Image: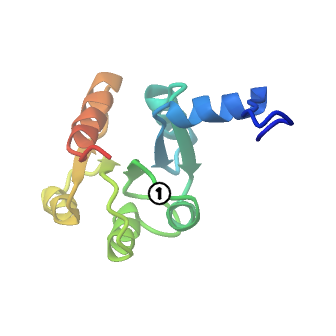
């Protein structure tokens, strides 16, 4: 905004907005039908530079991906009500949602790794896992991303 002397004026609000735009903020969506697991994921992955959105079932995850994206990372459980995590991710890939995906599961199936690998840009993490394992898997997926 220009003042009466033709000089640019900066308000506190404009300065704050400019500062927020300079910060690197990642957006992560996490989906799990177990409230305790969802809370663990939120606490383990959260920090002031990360915005976390949460879904408690497959339908909510689909809605978040469609309406609130793009996201820098998707973390999802496989078994959830309304729609399985892998079904959501297949639909997302078909809709050209190419964010990296961390699939978490307590299932022991041997073909599960192959299904996750076919998603592309995805990693499987089996429960139970520790916070260091979770953070390492997320770091690995994020490191694979091209710089914007």
Which residue lies under the disc numbered 1?
70
What residue do we see at 55% from left, 60% from top?
64
Coordinates of residue 25 in the picture (x, y in percent) = 48, 36
Decide if residue 129 is in sight here.
no
What residue do we see at 32% from left, 25% from top?
130
Furthest toward the right, the residue is: 4
Furthest toward the front, the residue is: 5
Left or right placement of residue 60 versus residue 79 in this view: right
17 w.r.t. 76: above or below: above
Asked whether 89 or 40 is in front, the reply is 89
Decide if residue 120 is in sight here.
yes
Disc 1 is placed on an element classified as loop
Coordinates of residue 31 in the picture (x, y in percent) = 48, 51
Coordinates of residue 121 in the picture (x, y in percent) = 22, 55
Asked whether 58 or 1 is in front, the reply is 1
Q: Quadrant of the N terminus?
A: top right
Left or right placement of residue 86 versus residue 51 in this view: left
Q: Residues within 10 Å of mark 1 (few under 14, many from 20)?
A: some
What residue do we see at 51% from left, 32% from top?
22
What residue do we see at 31% from left, 39% from top?
127
Question: Which quadrant of the view contains residue 14?
Answer: top right
């Amino acid at each position: 905004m220009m003042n009466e002397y033709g000089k640019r004026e900066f308000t506190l609000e404009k300065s704050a907005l400019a500062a927020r735009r300079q910060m690197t903020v990642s957006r992560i969506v996490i989906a799990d039908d177990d409230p305790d697991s969802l809370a663990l994921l939120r606490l383990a992955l959260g920090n002031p530079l990360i915005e976390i959105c949460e879904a408690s079932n497959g339908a909510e995850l689909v809605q978040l991906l469609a309406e609130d994206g793009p996201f820098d990372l998707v973390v999802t459980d496989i078994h959830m009500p309304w729609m399985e995590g892998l079904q959501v991710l297949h639909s997302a890939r078909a809709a050209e949602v190419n964010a990296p995906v961390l699939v978490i599961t307590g299932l022991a199936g041997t073909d599960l790794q192959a299904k996750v690998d076919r998603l592309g840009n995805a990693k499987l993490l089996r429960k139970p896992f520790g916070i260091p394992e979770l953070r390492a898997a997320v770091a690995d997926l994020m490191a694979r991303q091209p710089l914007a």
